[in-house]
Image (tube, rainbow, N blue to C red):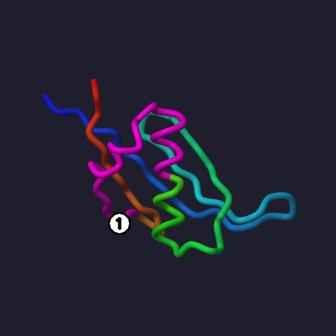
Amino acid sequence: MKHVIVIETYYLGPTNTLGARVVARTHTGFRRAIAWDHALDTDKNHLAALAALLIDKLDVPAVDMRKVTRGAGPHGAYIWTHPSRV
């Protein structure tokens, strides 16, 4: 049976104490937020959050990023899938 990791990325606007950021979270509870990079477009900011989560929290090598697929989620979020090593 093939397993996949499902990740949602979404934008959080700035607050009085924090700047704008993108959050990536998995269906299993892992979460990673990164600061919004104004030098990047929206897609690349979401991809950067996804890469940070996969590489930092889930130990997925950077070369495995080619296996990621993207879809649309609710309220402007992106839904990503990546094959699991389980």
Q: Is residue 38 left or right of residue 79?
A: right
The residue that appears at 32% across and 60% down in the rendered structure is 70
Q: Quadrant of the C terminus?
A: top left
Q: Is residue 65 left or right of residue 10?
A: left
Report the span colored magenta: 50-73
Percent coordinates x, y for residue 58 in the rendering:
46, 32
The residue that appears at 13% across and 28% down in the rendered structure is 1
Where 37 falls versus 58 (above or below)?
below
Q: Is residue 58 magenta?
A: yes
Q: Nearer the viewer, residue 18 or 63?
A: 63
Percent coordinates x, y for residue 79 in the rendering:
37, 56
Q: Is residue 37 left or right of residue 57?
A: right
The residue that appears at 28% across and 56% down in the rendered structure is 69
- Element type at mark 1: strand
Percent coordinates x, y for residue 85 in the rendering:
28, 28
Percent coordinates x, y for residue 84 in the rendering:
29, 33
Quarter of the figure with residue 56: top right
Instruction: From the image, tell me which residue sits under label 1.
Output: 72
Where 52 falls versus 76 (above or below)?
above
- Judged from this view, the residue extending furthest toward the left is 1
- Judged from this view, the residue extending furthest toward the front is 63
Q: Nearer the viewer, residue 40 or 36?
A: 40
Quarter of the figure with residue 13: bottom right
Q: Is residue 32 magenta?
A: no
Name the residue type under label 1: Ala
- Judged from this view, the residue extending furthest toward the top is 86
Q: Is residue 21 left or right of residue 30?
A: right
